[in-house]
Image (cartoon, grey):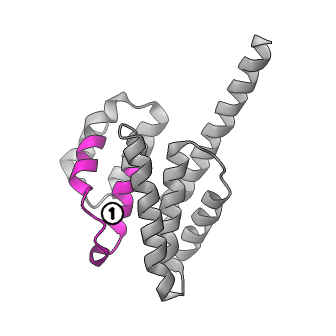
Amino acid sequence: MKLLLSLFTGLFLFFQASDLEVLRNSYSKANLSTEGAKNFIETASKKLSSDPVITGYKAAAEILEAKITTEKNKRKTHIKTGATALENAIKANPNTVELRIIRLSVQENIPKIVGYSKNLKEDKAFILNNYGKQNAALKSYIRKFAMQSKTMTAAEKNALK
């Protein structure tokens, strides 16, 4: 019985990790083109999980929906809904580095007029301070994000080796 439970748990964690990798890869391409954004939104919408990081990616997808929607009156709703969901996920899991990366990337790329950019310095500091504690896959993801980040300085990017 314990073996069966262990096997089931292992498979669940394996597939959850692969879901996370798929979301990470899709998210990293989301801002490059409208097609990339649509692909990420579709990928995120298919993920059913209570994992806070997946919830964060789904919130980012909701915010990104505002960028590609043709209905101007829906843009504000998408941003508000996504930002609220992302803030709630971070509030419930304040020590999760990947949620901070998601929020930092959203706030870097959203137009300043929207007013959702108050956590840039806080999130950058949190990511840099907790980088060494992360697993290899997340460290690699953080480095890739930092290299294209508008908020990270050259010295900070070099520190992430």
* 52 up-or-down from 8: above or below: below
- Main SS category, magenta section: helix
What residue is shown at x 43% (from left), y 78% (from top)?
A: 76
Q: Residue visible at 57% across and 52% down?
A: 23
Q: Secondary structure at mark 1?
A: helix
Residue 1 figure quarter: top right
Q: Nearer the viewer, residue 5 or 154?
A: 5
Q: How many marks?
A: 1
Q: Which residues are magenta?
A: 101-127
Q: Amino acid at mark 1?
A: Gln
Q: Position of residue 8 (x, y in %)?
A: 75, 25
Q: Is residue 132 left or right of residue 88?
A: left
Q: For the C terminus, which image quadrant?
A: top left
Q: Residues within 10 Å of mark 1 (few under 14, many from 20)?
A: many
- Say whether residue 105 is magenta: yes
Q: How far across and down, in percent of the image, does residue 151 sit?
A: 25, 58
Q: Is residue 76 above or below residue 131?
A: below
Q: From where the camera sits, is residue 32 visible?
A: no
Q: Nearer the viewer, residue 145 or 58?
A: 58
Q: Is residue 91 left or right of residue 25?
A: left
Percent coordinates x, y for residue 117 in the rendering: 27, 64
Which residue corresponds to mark 1? 107
Residue drawn at x 51%, y 54% as measured from the top left: 57
Q: Magenta includes 26?
A: no
Using the rendered view, name the quadrant where residue 105 is placed: bottom left
